Amino acid sequence: MKKRIMITAAGGPAGFCLAKYLKGKSYLIGLDGSADSPAKFFCDEVHIVPFAAAPNYREEMLKVIRRTNPDIIIPTFDEDLLFFDSVRDQIDCFILLSQSETLYTCNDKRKTAGTFPDIAAGTFTLEEARKQHPYPLFIRPATGRGSKMGFKIENDDDFEYALRKVQDPFIQEWLPGPEVTVDTFADFEGKLLGIAPRIRTQTRGGISTKGHFIKDVQIEKYCGIVHERLKIVGPANIQFMNDRNGNWGLIEINPRYAGGIGLSYQAGFDSITPLLTIDMEQMTLISEKMIPKYGVTVVRYWEERAVDD
């Protein structure tokens, strides 16, 4: 019998890729906030749920989960991670989710930087940034997704503008790049099964649309450190940028599938198929060592389909 797999934000970049590559191999239940979600082209059923900021989000999510009775839930959206962490004991199914401490460390960029002072990009308090550190700097919210509402600061005017725009600012040194996203996957004991580092050679709306896969000893070492300290379960994406001396600085850790996971899948890094082997009772999965095809570039493109009213 096919496993009933629920994918949250199933029309988003990560959820859509999971549905696309799991189609026909399991019974897919998609959750999305839009009635026109492309998830309907790949999922066996799609349910419209409120956005995470809505007051009835929690209630409606629990209703649809209990009504559809999935075997496995794959959260692909940051806000969903903390929700599922809060209802673990209320849902009778397997949730692919790291432990609470890991989730909250990754959600707060200050905690992330404090956990990895040896490999993270340099950070500064507001007072330190004003008085001691030369421009450029980078300011973004301490919590939230990716580099959304992030600002490069090159002078005092930039600094004051960013502070008006960003609540609870997190201040880092500016790293010129390039930027690398590393897709990783670990078993249920936190053992790292593989990494797929890709230079983000093209992005649209913050999502990678072209990636070049590289093998880098320093990145491999740093990803091992991240997984050793956080004991991440299942998928994650770890972001690094080059500093002015050519060394990699840790920028961000997201304990979920990346929006560009389809790029890694096409490069031979298959962290999706193991979902079909999950044994919910034994808490195991079957997977070989995951290794991408280094040196390849993978591109993605848009596809249009009509949606009936």
Image (cartoon, grey):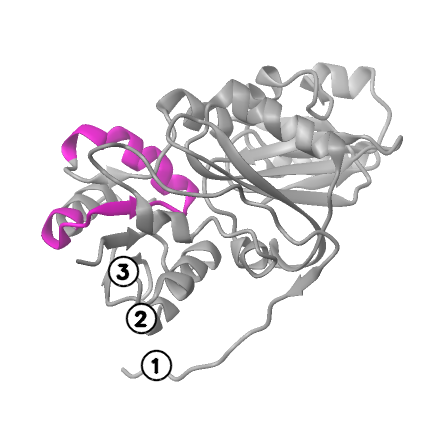
- Of callouts 2 and 3, the N-terminal one: 3
The image shows residue 136 at horizontal and vertical percentages of 83, 33
For the residues bearing labels 2 and 1, Cβ distance under 8 angstroms: yes
Give the secondary structure at mark 1: loop
Which mark identifies residue 136?
A: none
Q: Amino acid at mark 3?
A: Ser
Mark 3 or 1: the one toward you: 3
Please tell me which residue is depicted at 68% across the width and 24% down the height of the picture.
120
The image shows residue 273 at horizontal and vertical percentages of 40, 53
Q: Residue 109 vs residue 309: left or right? A: right
Please tell me which residue is depicted at 71% across the width and 61% down the height of the picture.
297
Magenta highlight on residue 77:
yes
The magenta span reads: 65-90
Q: Residue 54 vs residue 115: left or right? A: left
Q: Which residue is mark 1?
A: 307
Residue nearest the observer in this picture, 178 or 262 = 262
Q: Which residue is mark 3?
A: 26
The image quadrant of residue 20 is bottom left
The image quadrant of residue 2 is bottom left
Q: Which residue is mark 2?
A: 40
